[in-house]
């Protein structure tokens, strides 16, 4: 549920910016259900009805699934219509709205169809988050933790003295806005260096190989997780592997421990994960084989070795992953 007064405020600003240009609105449900091929015809019909051309601009106001789906539709309409995102969820503000990835799900797997098309602009305003359920607000912070893990000075971000949430004052909202923008800057900087994910950008998948598999395997269960919660599990798994390294390169586990403890504590405090029965190792492996980062039947991943230090790519062997995952599940069950 969005804040209607904020919606009206943005409508006024948009009307003033557009002048005499025609402005059209379409209200559609968000969520992963929108990221399906059979949802595209309605969007294309509206684009045609509104006579959108390459000189038009599509503005999304919503969460990451909305920006993924509408961004994809805009990127292929007339071979590309400009997009501006106004994200209204934590996840979208720090991650999904940035970097130019659009996506649809297919075959029960996330983000199997998509394009790379940078948005013309992204506008971040923490006021949109006030009406967001706290569970969704906190789930999105997993991506902010990931960004901190990728920064040499990530401890400064995680140790920021943030106001409590829900916030009590306008100044607190401004503080949160600035903090979210700072986190998004990590995504934007890395993505700009490698738009099509042929090199460095792949480090942004830290925690996602496991996270996507957990999310997909629990999607039809009573223990369904939000995307950020699944990513949080993936990040905890990356911390676990760093403390018990499969790949004997990078920092040793003793050097990693202080950083790992900081991230783990921050995740526990800020991104609580509901109790779930994690999938077994064999099901996880079968699901991970479909990850779009893979080549042939090799499961590629990002190994974390302390703040600002990762190894990419690393390749899991089935036996080593299953052994590591089994140990991690025992650890997770004891939390």
Image (spheres, rainbow, N blue to C red):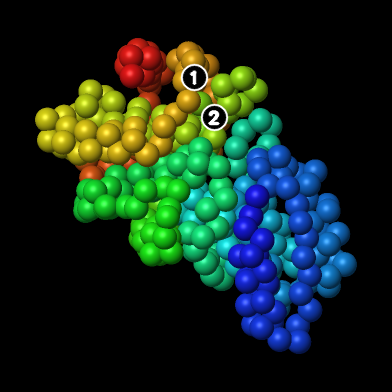
Residue 276 - label: 1
Location of residue 117 with respect to 41 vertically, above or below: below
Picture coordinates of residue 330 (x, y %)? 35, 12
Location of residue 110 with respect to 276 vertically, above or below: below
Location of residue 163 with respect to 75 vertically, above or below: above
Query: What residue is at 68 percent from the left and 37 percent from the top?
Result: 106
Q: Nearer the viewer, residue 184 or 150?
A: 184
Contact between marks 1 and 2 (CB within 8 A): the answer is yes
Query: What residue is at 27 percent from the left and 52 percent from the top?
Result: 161
Horizontal side, residue 167 vs residue 128: left or right? left
Q: CA distance from mark 1 to mark 2?
A: 9 Å
Query: What residue is at 34 percent from the left and 53 percent from the top?
Result: 163
Residue 248 in which image quadrant: top left
Picture coordinates of residue 263 (x, y %)? 27, 38
Of all residues, the one furthest to the bottom in this rendering is: 20
Residue 180 - label: none
The C terminus - image quarter: top left
- The answer to whether residue 196 of the structure is visible from this angle is no
Binning the other alpha carbons within 10 Å of mark 2 as few (below 14), some (14 to 19) or many (20 upward) gives many
Horizontal side, residue 144 vs residue 227: left or right? left
Horizontal side, residue 266 vs residue 82: left or right? left
Picture coordinates of residue 203 (x, y %)? 37, 46
Identify the secondary structure beneath mark 1.
loop
* Lower sequence index among marks 1 and 2: 2
Identify the secondary structure beneath mark 2.
loop
- Residue under numbered circle 2: 225
């Amino acid at each position: 549920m969005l804040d209607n007064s904020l919606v009206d405020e943005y409508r006024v600003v948009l009307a003033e910016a557009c002048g005499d240009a025609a402005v059209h609105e379409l209200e559609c449900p968000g969520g992963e259900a929108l990221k399906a091929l059979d949802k595209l015809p309605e969007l294309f019909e509206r684009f045609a009805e509104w006579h959108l051309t390459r000189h038009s601009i599509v503005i999304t106001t919503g969460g990451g699934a909305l920006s993924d789906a509408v961004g994809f539709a805009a990127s292929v309409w007339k071979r590309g219509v400009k997009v501006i995102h106004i994200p209204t969820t934590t996840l979208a503000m720090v991650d999904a709205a940035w970097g130019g990835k659009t996506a649809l799900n297919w075959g029960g797997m996330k983000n199997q169809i998509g394009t790379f098309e940078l948005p013309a602009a992204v506008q971040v305003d923490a006021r949109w988050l006030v009406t967001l359920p706290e569970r969704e607000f906190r789930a999105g912070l997993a991506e902010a933790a990931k960004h901190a893990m990728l920064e040499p000075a990530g401890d400064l971000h995680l140790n920021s003295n943030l106001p409590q949430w829900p916030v009590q004052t306008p100044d607190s909202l401004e503080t949160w806005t600035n903090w979210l923008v700072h986190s998004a800057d990590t995504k934007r900087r890395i993505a700009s260096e490698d738009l099509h994910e042929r090199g460095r950008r792949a480090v942004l998948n830290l925690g996602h190989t496991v996270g996507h598999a957990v999310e997909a395997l629990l999607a039809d269960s009573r223990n369904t997780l939000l995307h950020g919660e699944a990513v949080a599990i993936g990040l905890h798994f990356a911390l676990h592997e760093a403390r018990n390294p499969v790949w004997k390169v990078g920092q040793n586990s003793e050097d990693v421990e202080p950083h790992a403890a900081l991230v783990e504590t921050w995740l526990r405090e800020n991104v609580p994960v509901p109790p779930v029965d994690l999938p077994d190792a064999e099901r996880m492996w079968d699901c991970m084989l479909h990850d779009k980062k893979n080549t042939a039947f090799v499961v590629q991943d990002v190994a974390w070795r302390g703040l600002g230090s990762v190894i990419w790519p690393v390749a899991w062997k089935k036996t080593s992953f299953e052994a590591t995952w089994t140990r991690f599940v025992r650890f997770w069950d004891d939390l």
